[in-house]
Image (cartoon, rainbow, N blue to C red):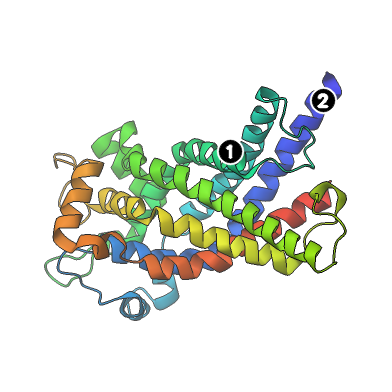
Amino acid sequence: MKPLAEDRGIEAARDIASGSVAGGFGKLIEYPFDTVKVRLQSQPHPPIYTGPLDCFRQSLHAPEGGLRSLYRGISAPLLGAAVETSSLFFSYALAKSAFRAAIPSLPQEKSEKLPLDVLLACGAISGAVTSLLLTPIELVKCKLQYPVATPTDGISRTQKSHGPMSVIASVFRNHGILGFWRGQLGTLIRETGGSSAWFGSYEAVNIMLRNRRHRHGEISDTNIAKQPPAPFHHQLLAGACAGVAYNFVFFPADTIKSRMQTEDLGTSSGKNQVQSTFWRTGVELWRQQGLRGLYRGCGITVVRAAPSSAVIFAIYEALMGLSR
């Protein structure tokens, strides 16, 4: 039993370490686009940005400096990316092991792929687990990314000087420990459905590409256990498709979450403010801006998700391959 426990511990450590590194690299690529997405999602009605390009332009001309404005608050998201990606891959591996243990008819070797419907369920489970860790980090990120205007000059000088610790202290002071999980329902919906689509799309595209290679005689068998790793460009393509699927399907939940997490910005005090629920925020947004409002910022999100997700999967697969 001891060698088995040690093997599982080593495998878990590899998942966490590889996921953390891959998530960090992915976040560096996508963060400026994510900043623009949050600003588009959280802007008041009528909008102050005409679209992603206008938001980029205004951010680049911000008094605090162009790239600095776009990378504002990146320390918390870097931590969040490491936590999110490592948790996703680790929980995904645990879920697959749990399914194998519960259903003996499934392939029992880790080198053998599970059916796609089981992989979709494993992705949903990993997303649900990860949402609990991610909501507090994303709440801090959104508050740091969102530019707050003052009545005098349209620039929040206090916001510019705030860092993650200042935001954390403010949230705890005004809303207590549970305040860090504001928007949890939106994160849960997005992560559960999105992670199912993320892992499911990655696996499905890899299966499709493997079958294509088999038809063209490039490999002799579609059984992944009998074949070398997929070509690097196939991993990138599958990862890019996964990123698009993850972000597009459940994007409205992310929009509602971002509005909830930034709605108290620009007020003198958020402590006594009556905060909206997830459904109330969604209904209000629908009445104000319709379907377009729910998908505001989706285009730029999909654009940044494709390369970021491609890099995450490619780095993760490479690191896991080196550590085996």
Residue 288 relative to residue 14: left or right:
left
Please report whichever mark, 2 or 1, sits nearer to the chain's N-terminal start. Answer: 2
Q: Secondary structure at mark 1?
A: helix
Q: Furthest residue to the top?
A: 1
Which quadrant does the N terminus fall into?
Answer: top right
Question: Which residue is depicted at the point 22% across and 54% down?
Answer: 265
Q: Position of residue 86 (x, y in %)?
A: 61, 45
Determine whether 245 is above or below 191 in the image: below
Q: Furthest residue to the front?
A: 215
The answer, for residue 221, to whether it is visible in the render is yes
In this rendered view, identify the residue nearer to me: 242 or 213: 213
- How packed is label 2: few (under 14 Cα within 10 Å), some, or many (20 or more)? few
Judging by the rendered image, the residue that carries numbered circle 2 is 4
Question: Which residue is depicted at the point 33% across and 54% down?
Answer: 252
Judging by the rendered image, the residue that carries numbered circle 1 is 122
Q: Position of residue 41 (x, y in %)?
A: 29, 61
